[in-house]
Image (spheres, grey):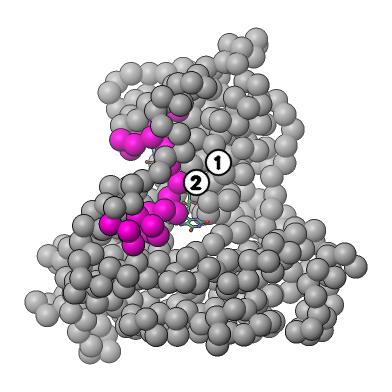
Amino acid sequence: MDPSRTRIVIVGAGQAGARAAEALRAAGHRGSISLLGEEQHPPYERPQLSKAMLTNASEEPRFIRNSQDWAAIDIKLSTSTPTVAVDVNRRAIGLSDGREISFDRLLLATGTRPRRLRDLENCGLRVCYLRCIDDALELRRNLAPGTKVVLVGGGVIGLEVASAAIARGCDVTVLEKADRLLPQVGSPALSGYLRRLHSDRGVAICCNATIMGVTAKGIELADGKTVPTDLVVVGVGVEPAADLARQAGLAVDQGIRVGPSGMTDIDGIYAAGDVAEQWSGWHGRWMRVENWANAQNQAIATARNMVGQDVSYEVPPWFWSDQFDANIQVIGHPGGADEIVRGDVERGRFTTISLRDGEVVGAVTVNSQKDMALLRRLAASRKRVNPSDIANPAFDLKQALTS
Ligand SMILES: Cc1cc2nc3c(=O)[nH]c(=O)nc-3n(C[C@H](O)[C@H](O)[C@H](O)COP(=O)(O)OP(=O)(O)OC[C@H]3O[C@@H](n4cnc5c(N)ncnc54)[C@H](O)[C@@H]3O)c2cc1C
């Protein structure tokens, strides 16, 4: 087919969809590109929602491009336009308003949705989730000084909101059902550090917390405590928005399964970003990766494959989080009893490194960005290192890369 007539449709105008659309044009694609999103806003990046937009009452949301700039690169952006069906045989998608759009290639970049706690929603409490601009604006309106805010979930979202709520003068409690904060990361050093960081700033932390019910006095826990509550923010993980893919008969497990090029099991249909599940040679298993870097880079690699380039995408997962004045960065899967800790945990500047057979399989840095830059390269290189070198505080990590 004449490439200038190849019609590409992207469902999901989040970060991955937007970056893929830009990358298609950058790769020289001359056919039509339709970018379809169900939100009313043009595409934006989500990290701002739990950081500047909450802490600063006048912070305006930032968009990847405004609506006119999408037209300038000949991308037809349609907001408030949910896609409701994918017909793989007729190569067409159906929109909620009854229209159909035909495609030659389709990218599903539908992301994730917050896991909801219906029982709490039905107890008469004000319950918020944080996924989109409208959620952030609503939450911000409610973070008034003295408001009793309870975060259900001591993961990244819960802890970032806790930090913002303290900055806004709220009275904050974090309920985490595991025995430590950020259990998903699995680093005992990081969990211990976060507990101190948040407690020192006035956050009440309850680990091993099981919610039994809600009374007029607040949320009742299994240990008999009652936590007074004006506002509940739930951050207990997300689920892939994979219903369209399932209905269309694509292979879906923990997300939409894609091969190394980003293509699903049906020719010409691709997936990228939070919704895609890809084999990780680095981890040796299928993985759905939920972070900013993956939404950007996997989407760009997939877009290039969609127009005939041959690009493979495989890097260790990496994300960051900002809480109070701490910058936390994580790659791979750190943790376990064997993590090597370098630096000063008490003073909030340290690095932890987890090795398997001498390879870096996970690392955490707190206020140590330079270490993370080195460790990302070291992990990606799959070089073997000597554990006793890494454990030696005088050893320069740069040497591990160059030796
Ligand atoms: C509050 C918050 C803070 C974060 N902070 C960080 C951070 O500090 N560092 C980090 O690394 N990562 C962070 N992340 C994660 C990062 O933002 C996500 O990994 C990234 O947004 C994933 O991009 P995506 O495009 O795959 O999915 P999404 O951003 O979820 O976008 C998918 C889009 O598709 C739309 N959609 C879904 N179904 C349909 C349909 N049927 N029709 C049309 N449109 C549809 C959705 O409405 C959505 O707009 C944060 C996430 C959140 C929510």
Q: Which kind of residue does numbered mark 1 sit on?
A: Ala
Q: Is label 1's Cβ within 8 Å of ligand 1?
A: yes
Is residue 303 in view from this perspective? yes
From the image, tell me which residue sits under label 2.
275
Instruction: Pick out the residue farthest to the bottom.
Output: 224
* Quadrant (top left, top right, bottom left, bottom right) of the N terminus: top right
Q: Is residue 266 left or right of residue 17?
A: right
Secondary structure under badge 2?
A: helix
In depth, the one of 71 and 8 nearer the eye is: 71
In depth, the one of 58 and 292 nearer the eye is: 58
Q: Is residue 133 above or below residue 122?
A: above
Q: Is residue 279 above or below residue 342?
A: above
Q: Is residue 330 left or right of residue 140?
A: right
Please name the residue shown 72% across and 65% down the image.
Answer: 375
Q: Which kind of residue does numbered mark 2 sit on?
A: Val
Instruction: Pick out the residue farthest to the right.
Output: 403
In depth, the one of 265 and 3 nearer the eye is: 3
- The residues tagged by marks 2 and 1 sit, at their Cα atoms, a distance apart of 6 Å
Q: Residues within 10 Å of mark 2 (few under 14, many from 20)?
A: many
**Image coords of residue 155 (percent x, y):** 43, 69
Residue span colored magenta: 33-57
Please name the residue shown 15% across and 66% down the image.
Answer: 125
Q: Is label 2's Cβ within 8 Å of ligand 1?
A: yes
Q: Residues within 10 Å of mark 1 (few under 14, many from 20)?
A: many
* Quadrant (top left, top right, bottom left, bottom right) of the C terminus: bottom right
Please name the residue shown 62% across and 57% down the image.
Answer: 317
From the image, tell me which residue sits under label 1.
272
